[in-house]
């Protein structure tokens, strides 16, 4: 066995089977979870998942999809939005901290190890889909990679959906299906559920390979601790270290429109003035307006509207 194989093989085996810190099922340890989200400098959950503040989450509820997309693209994140969903209660926006789960087609040998580890870790019951639900916190949004499976890929029905909503107050996303869409819709008019389709079958022939690990949802790589934003365009996944910038730039764009419309209604400035480079006087007036609205965002003299 050459030296490279001797070094790399044990690392791969460790990633594949070793339980992570705090005995949480998954492919990532707490240390790896922190390392792969190293640009986040704020608070974290005990397992290392980034925890942006509730205050910032509230601000993110007003973030514009277009602003988020542009901000992330400028930072090098080019594939952060995924469309093509069927939705339960789309009227309210789905916003929260992402908890990830990844399922794969069942293999008896691997599934036996998962079940054994689940018992060792004190996980309740044999339903692996319930294991990840047990970890949820308020303002979390569970995002499940069910590899697009529809029949027998129904992550939840009305019972598990009730538990998800009771724990989070938000909703969940499945790159797969749910069953009993009617029952789920009756849980609350505030639960938001995004799936690829609905099916009457029960979940079968899948195994839970990880909780709070990187997953793929369509064309997006999703990390635990991302902030999810729902819009008519689809679901946007914002890395936590960019969340405040997205919130700031969205708030600035909103206030810019409000102030510009106000100036036009009052006849103080012409459309040409509002839509072109602002003067120092205009910027100072805008900043006073933003401050009066309780906002901390400000426009610099050299910036365009």
Image (cartoon, rainbow, N blue to C red):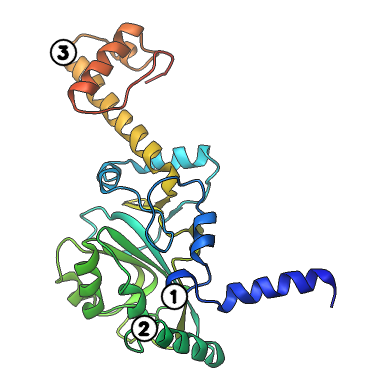
Classify mark 2: helix, strand or loop. Answer: loop
Judging by the rendered image, the residue that carries numbered circle 2 is 122
| Residue in the image at 53% along x and 92% along y | 108
Q: Which residue is mark 1?
A: 23
Query: Residue 33 at x, y = what percent?
Result: 50, 60
Tell me which label, 2 or 1, sits earlier in the chain. Answer: 1
* Residue at mark 3 to residue at mark 1: CA–CA distance: 62 Å
Instruction: Say if 157 sits above or below 45 in the image.
Output: below
Q: How far across and down, in percent of the image, does residue 154 sit?
A: 35, 79
Nearer to the camera, 282 or 125:
125
Q: Which quadrant of the structure image shows residue 261?
A: top left
Q: Is residue 279 above or below residue 255?
A: above
Q: Residue at x 49, y 73 (%)?
A: 26
Q: Nearer the viewer, mark 3 or mark 2?
A: 2
Instruction: Give the position of the N terminus as an image quadrant.
Output: bottom right
Mark 2 near mark 1, Cβ–Cβ under 8 Å?
Answer: yes
Q: Is residue 14 left or right of residue 196?
A: right
């Amino acid at each position: 066995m050459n030296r490279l194989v001797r070094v790399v093989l044990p690392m791969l085996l460790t990633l594949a089977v070793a339980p992570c810190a705090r005995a949480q099922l998954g492919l990532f340890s707490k240390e790896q979870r922190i390392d792969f989200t190293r640009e986040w400098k704020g608070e974290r959950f005990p397992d290392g998942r980034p925890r942006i503040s509730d205050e910032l989450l509230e601000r993110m509820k007003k973030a514009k999809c277009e602003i988020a997309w542009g901000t992330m693209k400028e930072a090098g994140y080019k594939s952060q939005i995924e469309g093509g969903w069927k939705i339960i209660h789309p009227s309210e926006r789905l916003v929260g901290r992402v908890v990830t789960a990844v399922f794969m087609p069942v293999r008896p040998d691997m599934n036996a190890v998962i079940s054994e580890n689940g018992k060792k870790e004190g996980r309740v019951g044999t339903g692996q889909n319930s294991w990840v639900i047990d970890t949820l916190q308020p303002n979390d949004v569970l995002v499940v990679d069910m590899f697009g499976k529809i029949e027998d890929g129904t992550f939840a029905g009305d019972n598990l959906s009730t538990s998800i909503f009771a724990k989070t107050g938000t909703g969940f996303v499945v790159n797969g299906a749910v069953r009993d869409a009617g029952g789920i819709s009756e849980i609350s008019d505030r639960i938001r559920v995004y799936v690829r389709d609905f099916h009457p079958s029960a979940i079968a022939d899948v195994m839970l390979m990880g909780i709070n690990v990187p997953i793929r949802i369509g064309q997006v790589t999703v990390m635990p601790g991302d902030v999810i934003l729902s819009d008519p365009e689809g679901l946007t996944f914002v890395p936590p270290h960019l969340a405040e910038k997205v919130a700031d730039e969205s708030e600035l764009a909103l206030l810019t429109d409000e102030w510009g419309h106000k100036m036009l209604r009052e006849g103080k400035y012409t459309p040409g003035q509002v839509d072109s480079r602002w003067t120092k006087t205009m910027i100072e007036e805008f900043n006073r307006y933003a401050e009066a609205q309780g906002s901390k965002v400000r426009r610099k003299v050299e910036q365009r509207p």
